[in-house]
Amino acid sequence: MRYRLGSFVLLIYILVGLYVAWLHDYITPTLLKQVAQALIAVFLWFLVLLGVDLHIGG
């Protein structure tokens, strides 16, 4: 039970931090797009080696 409560508090803490960072423009749509592209490239690295363009959007 104690582990669950600690995990829940940590989750709330992180969500509030993300919200505050978004409000103060530390997190922007451009940043989210770049992070998404990086994560896709990391998980699909073999496609990158084959020359596939994994950029999102234009």
Image: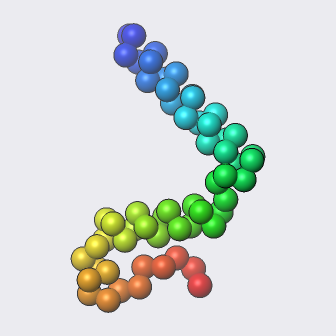
Residue at image coords 40%, 63%: 39
Residue furthest toward the right?
A: 23
Residue 7, placed above or below residue 22: above
Residue 22, placed above or below residue 57: above
Residue at image coords 56%, 67%: 33
x then y, percent, for residue 25: 72, 53
Residue furthest toward the top?
A: 2
Q: Is residue 13 left or right of residue 28?
A: left
Residue at image coords 29%, 80%: 47
Residue at image coords 49%, 64%: 36
x then y, percent, for residue 51: 32, 89
Looking at the rendering, which quadrant does residue 2 occupy?
A: top left
Q: Quadrant of the N terminus?
A: top left
Q: Is residue 46 left or right of residue 41?
A: left
Looking at the rendering, which quadrant does residue 43 occupy?
A: bottom left
Q: Quadrant of the C terminus?
A: bottom right
Q: Is residue 23 left or right of residue 12?
A: right
Residue furthest toward the bottom?
A: 51
Say how many tags the image has. 0
x then y, percent, for residue 14: 55, 34
Colour scheme in use:
rainbow
